[in-house]
Image (cartoon, rainbow, N blue to C red):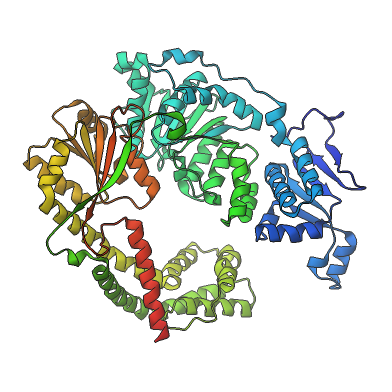
């Protein structure tokens, strides 16, 4: 990624200097240390403008300042403040060339300073980010496409053809495929693997769709549809007895069990890793992420395809694992720097991050690629007798009462928790005695809503947010003390939040389940008519296990053929095939957690939601089971709601949670003021 372009006379030199038009003003490219050094600009003004432009100091983590010898000497003698020290140069890892280019361009546009634009232009011209204009890679050989039963769509073929070129241009070890749901990411990934002529393809997916991958692979290839024995010889799924090949071409594993296939993988540089729903690897410190990175290391994989229909947000825990997988120069050390620089989500920082990911994400949406039938989303409003008990105001009162009981219970044990928490923090803190005591006083105020918290301002929260991570946890050597302190953080520091969560959990979900049961009891004839009048099949999604069985019982009583898939269902692919092929089965009932991703169900064109998912992205994914390639008639999505004059608890659950948080905040504020 950091190879210099061949427009200098001596490209073998370990350092190349690019002058910026002023005496002693230049950029030095250091190939050996993979850095570039900016010298000769007014750095103090640059830093001040940077802070004003981005409203944060975190961007400064991207570079290392070198001060003049005189400044260092005077500062050490306490003659000047650190802010007044003269900066000689900034040293930046070459990985961050794109970020620094964007920063200087932003500063040039904002302050109308041509000199900053000149710095940006030189960074662009003499580092890897100009490779797109300077070098061309070879297109992917698509001759192996003849083995496939289907011809890729134009947008799929474009990505496959350009994949090698994109990798070469940016010197990457893979790419991010971000087709919108329903645009055929699975087929595109398998077709790419075949065109790359890989002898081992490792597929990592959510547990609910591991077998769906196997069925899709069988459907894609002519030889597999004709010869089931050959298909099962080439495909292996961890912990599935139907697929137990000893030398498989395809290894399929769920995201939580990656370490279980380490003994099977090859290190021959001809492996491809496909990560489905890669946005699930957001946390850079999680076991699943570390296992994924270990798998890449064991296989020496140079073709890592990360798939996600969910747009990536500009937050470090989402970006870092992806960068670690596809960029060979993104080291753990750089990851820490990146996290420090971008762990704030302002629009300015987001724009800086997007510049990089626009070059490593291949994104397509339905609106720009397909002409699908119409999709209509609407509400089904149903009445029940005496609906008042499901009004938001009624449930609000019940939750508040439950919170009061739970908070009192938590408060009884707080005294002992406080003593133990203080003891462990004092024992291991490397901060001064006063700093440590100030922190403990702050925590006590935060954990007690009965104390008036006028002294707790946002800047103090920010100061103490990282106190334990910086001053306490690094000094703990005993595992039991660390685990105990983590427990105390939950039970003592977060006592109010724990009480809130328990109160909501005890009241809200059971109330919603009972409400949907009553809606079904009182409106089953209309629901059945909706199913029978539909020209194709129907999906019923719910967030609640009890509702799946409740609806199933009603449908069977009314001679409506149906099947059900929940988390404990073992033979889900057999059930899906039965739903697809059996004309006597009109309805598939499922929880959104088990069937909202990775499955094509275009045999249906209608969905009934008895409770929508938390996130709009999950709701859209569930809808896309029917609204995707292969659908030939209009689709209708119905969200079942209770009809009342006032707000009730069948609205989107996120509204309820937002409302609940506001209710608690208002309730606690009232108590503080009394």
The residue drawn where x is 50% and y is 13% is 143
- Viewer can see residue 33: no
- Image quarter for residue 563? top left
Q: Nearer the viewer, residue 404 or 355?
A: 355
Q: Residue furthest right?
A: 23
Lateral position of residue 19 relative to residue 667, left or right: right
Up/down of 363 relative to 434, above or below: above
Up/down of 496 relative to 477, above or below: below
- Viewer can see residue 205: yes
Q: In the picture, which quadrant includes the C terminus?
A: bottom left
Lateral position of residue 293 relative to residue 206, left or right: right
The residue drawn where x is 67% and y is 30% is 132
Up/down of 137 relative to 598, above or below: above
The residue drawn where x is 36% and y is 30% is 372
Question: Residue 54 location, x and y as percent?
Answer: 66, 57
The residue drawn where x is 25% and y is 62% is 648
- Image quarter for residue 188? top left
Lateral position of residue 260 relative to residue 557, left or right: right
Q: In the picture, which quadrant includes the N terminus?
A: top right
């Amino acid at each position: 990624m950091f190879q210099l372009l061949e427009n200098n006379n001596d490209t073998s030199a370990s350092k190349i200097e690019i002058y910026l038009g002023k005496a002693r003003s230049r950029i030095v490219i250091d190939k050996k240390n993979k850095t570039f050094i900016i010298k000769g600009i007014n750095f103090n003004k640059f830093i001040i403008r940077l802070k004003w432009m981005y409203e944060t100091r975190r961007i400064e983590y991207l570079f290392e300042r070198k001060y003049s010898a005189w400044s260092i000497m005077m500062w050490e003698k306490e003659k000047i403040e650190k802010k007044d020290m003269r900066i000689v140069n900034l040293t930046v890892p070459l990985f961050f060339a794109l970020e620094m280019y964007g920063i200087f361009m932003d500063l040039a546009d904002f302050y109308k300073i041509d000199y900053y634009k000149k710095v940006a232009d030189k960074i662009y011209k003499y580092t890897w980010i100009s490779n797109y204009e300077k070098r061309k890679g070879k297109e992917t050989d698509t001759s192996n496409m003849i083995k496939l039963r289907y011809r890729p769509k134009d947008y799929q073929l474009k990505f496959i053809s350009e994949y090698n070129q994109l990798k070469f241009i940016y010197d990457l070890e893979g790419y991010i495929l971000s087709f919108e749901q329903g645009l055929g990411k699975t087929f595109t990934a398998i077709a790419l693997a075949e065109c790359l002529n890989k002898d081992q393809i490792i597929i990592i997916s959510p547990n609910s769709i591991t077998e769906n991958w196997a069925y899709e692979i069988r459907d894609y290839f002519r030889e597999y549809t004709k010869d089931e024995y050959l298909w099962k010889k080439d495909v292996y799924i961890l912990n599935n007895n139907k697929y137990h090949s000893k030398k498989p071409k395809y290894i399929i594993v769920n995201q939580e069990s990656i370490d279980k296939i380490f003994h099977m993988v090859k290190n021959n540089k001809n492996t491809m890793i496909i990560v489905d729903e890669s946005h699930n690897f957001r946390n850079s410190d999680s076991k699943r992420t570390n296992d994924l990175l270990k798998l890449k290391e064991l296989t020496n994989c140079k073709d890592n395809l990360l798939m996600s229909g969910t747009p990536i947000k500009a937050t470090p825990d989402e970006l870092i694992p992806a960068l670690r997988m596809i960029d060979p120069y993104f080291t753990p050390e750089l990851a820490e720097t990146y996290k420090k620089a971008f762990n704030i989500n302002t629009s300015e920082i987001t724009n800086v991050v997007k510049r990089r990911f626009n070059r490593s994400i291949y994104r397509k949406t339905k609106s720009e690629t397909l002409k699908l039938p119409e999709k209509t989303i609407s509400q089904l409003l149903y009445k029940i007798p005496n609906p008042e008990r499901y009004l938001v105001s009624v449930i609000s009162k019940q939750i508040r009462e439950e919170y009061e009981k739970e908070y009192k219970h938590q408060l009884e044990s707080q005294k002992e928790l406080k003593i133990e928490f203080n003891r462990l923090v004092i024992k291991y803190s490397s901060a001064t005695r006063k700093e440590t005591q100030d922190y403990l006083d702050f925590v006590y105020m935060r954990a007690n809503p009965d104390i008036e918290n006028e002294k707790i301002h946002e800047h103090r929260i920010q100061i103490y947010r990282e106190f334990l991570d910086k001053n306490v946890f690094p000094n703990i050597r005993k595992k039991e003390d660390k685990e105990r302190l983590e427990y105390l953080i939950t039970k003592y520091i977060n006592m109010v939040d724990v009480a809130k969560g328990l109160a909501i959990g005890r009241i809200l979900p059971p109330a919603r389940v009972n409400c949907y049961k009553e809606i079904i009891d009182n409106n089953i004839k209309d629901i059945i008519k909706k199913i029978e009048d539909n020209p194709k099949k129907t999906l019923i999604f719910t967030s609640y296990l009890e509702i799946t069985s409740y609806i199933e019982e009603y449908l069977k009583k009314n001679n409506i053929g149906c099947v059900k898939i929940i988390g404990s269902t073992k033979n889900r692919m057999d059930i899906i095939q039965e739903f697809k092929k059996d004309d006597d089965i009109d309805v598939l009932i499922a929880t959104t957690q088990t069937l909202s991703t990775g499955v094509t169900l275009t045999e249906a064109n209608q969905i009934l939601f008895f409770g929508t998912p938390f996130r709009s992205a999950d709701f859209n994914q569930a809808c896309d089971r029917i609204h995707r390639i292969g659908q030939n008639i209009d689709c209708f999505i119905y969200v079942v709601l209770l009809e009342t004059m006032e707000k009730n608890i069948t609205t989107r659950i996120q509204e309820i949670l937002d409302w609940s948080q506001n209710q608690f905040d208002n309730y606690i504020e009232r108590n503080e003021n009394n």
